[in-house]
Amino acid sequence: MKKYHNICFITIIGIGLSLIVSCNSCRKQKDLVQQEVIEPYVQVSPEFNTDSAYQYVEKQVSFGPRIPNSDAHRACGDYLTTKLTLFGAQVTEQKADIRHYDGSILRMRNIIGSYQPEKAKRILLFAHWDTRPWADRETDLQKQKQPILGADDGASGVGVLLEIARQLQQKPIAVGIDIIFFDLEDSGQPVFDTHIVPGEWWCLGSEYWAKNPHVPEYKASYGILLDMVGAPDASFMKEGYSVQYAANIVEKIWRTAVNLGYGQFFISRNNGYVTDDHLPVNKHHRAPAVDIINIKDNTSTGFPSHWHTHDDNMNIISRGTLKAVGQTVMEVIYSEKGD
Ligand code: AHN
Ligand code: ZN
């Protein structure tokens, strides 16, 4: 009887052990299977055409430096207005006379293209279209006094947004979109003028709009600024004011970029505070706004080495970078649900 008991006991333990073992291997197999069938990310947005974005950058640069009060500035402004109109946006222009740091008057022209203006839920996409009147980061003083072409600093963000405008006409989305090309971003006091004039001389177009929006009481769910989004080795780090005012939008954009395979451009690191067009937009509460901007930690300025030099020309524009930024922004906005 005792022996029988023992056998019985051993058998029960045996069955128990084998159950545990088989359950474990069962679970292991399941884990394996689950790992093998991780779903690839399925893109919801139409394909951003980077050749077309490149052309829009090239066209702006072909006017020459788009410095305030110049013929090239006027001609390029007309081009941008015409393009937005052709792409089906409702276009509004804001004009005002704004005081420059040296006391002269700059004739400002902000260009706004609205899609589905009747919709309450809106997203604001913006870039500056003016170019810096000086190459004040050149070492040679003569070169410093010449205006830059601003292929990256100016034209790249606008080029990407024009392509997005074209796409919005082809395939409308669930939310309203406002695209703003701000003027007078880049007329801040040059470094060679050491007699510092107190005041804020950067981002004058966006400051004007944030105080006097084209629609009274204007608010957007969020805003995205594109600044210097064309260089082949661009690194978009998480800029300080963007994180301070719009942390969840920063995360949404960077996560989307990684999902699309653009993690080499969208770096998961915080780096610096930049006075840029998103600052007035944030301060005046028009939208929590994020700056996608090429930031470097291995240069003295914190910006790429071509910044505010004559190297900022078509040679530093890469279709691959325009694509990474354009497709990421499109994916973010085409994922939005309506009101
Ligand atoms: C300042 O240098 C104060 N802000 C940089 C913003 C900028 C200039 N973006 C392009 N050009
Ligand atoms: Zn600049």
Image: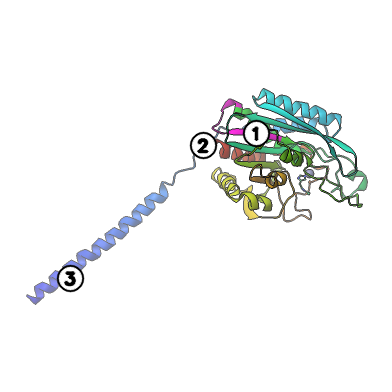
Q: Is 18 left or right of 90, judged from the image as shown?
A: left
- Amino acid on which disc 1 is placed: Asp
Q: Estimate how packed mark 2 is, as few (under 14), some (14 to 19) or many (20 or more) residues with alpha carbons within 10 Å.
A: few
Image quarter (top left, top right, bottom left or bottom right) of the N terminus: bottom left
- Compare residues 291 and 331 and report the one nearer the observer: 291
Name the secondary structure under disc 1: strand
Identify the residue position indicated by label 2 in the image.
337
Identify the residue position indicated by label 1 in the image.
178
Res 209 quadrant in image: top right
Q: Is 22 left or right of 282, judged from the image as shown?
A: left
Q: Estimate how packed mark 1 is, as few (under 14), some (14 to 19) or many (20 or more) residues with alpha carbons within 10 Å.
A: many
Percent position of residue 183, x then y: 77, 37
Q: Is residue 176 magenta?
A: yes
Identify the residue position indicated by label 3 in the image.
10
* Vertical relation: 154 (above or below) 23: above
Q: Quadrant of ligand 2?
A: top right
